[in-house]
Image: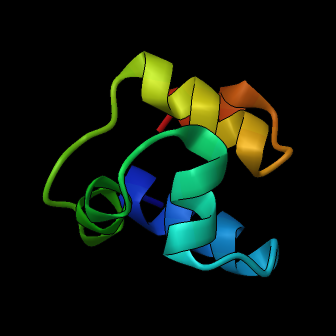
């Protein structure tokens, strides 16, 4: 699974919209969209924020 697929899957499992995830992480909704489409790769800091917002273990997002 790619980081794009993982972020989208985990976000949907959490019942969150891209906008809601953006608010919780402080990452713009545009960037969340680009990450989920595979147009950009999130930095480690962004991965930490996404993992925390989705209540997931950071290792899931680092080893992708």
Residue visible at 26% across and 63% down in the picture: 30
- The total number of labels drawn is 0
Q: Quadrant of residue 11?
A: bottom right
Q: Position of residue 62 (x, y in %)?
A: 54, 26
Q: Considering depth in this image, is 50 or 25 the residue closer to the camera?
A: 25
Residue visible at 45% across and 68% down in the picture: 5
The relative height of residue 42 versus residue 32 in the rendered view (above or below) is above
Residue 63, visible in the rendered structure = no
Residue visible at 68% across and 80% down in the picture: 12
64 relative position to 57: left or right: left
The relative height of residue 10 versus residue 61 in the rendered view (above or below) is below
Q: Position of residue 7 (x, y in %)?
A: 53, 59
The relative height of residue 33 versus residue 42 in the rendered view (above or below) is below
64 relative position to 40: left or right: right
Q: Quadrant of residue 31?
A: bottom left
Residue 20, visible in the rendered structure = yes
Q: Position of residue 46 (x, y in %)?
A: 46, 30
Q: Residue furthest top?
A: 45
Residue visible at 69% across and 38% down in the picture: 51
Q: Considering depth in this image, is 18 or 63 the residue closer to the camera?
A: 18
The relative height of residue 30 versus residue 41 in the rendered view (above or below) is below
How is the protein colored in the picture?
A: rainbow
55 relative position to 46: left or right: right
Q: Position of residue 19 (x, y in %)?
A: 51, 71
Q: Residue furthest left?
A: 39
């Amino acid at each position: 699974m790619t980081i794009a697929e993982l972020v989208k899957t985990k976000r949907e499992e959490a019942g969150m919209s891209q906008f809601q995830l953006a608010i919780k992480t402080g990452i713009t909704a545009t960037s969340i969209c680009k990450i989920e489409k595979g147009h950009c790769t999130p930095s480690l800091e962004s991965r930490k924020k996404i993992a925390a917002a989705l209540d997931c273990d950071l290792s899931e997002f680092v080893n992708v």
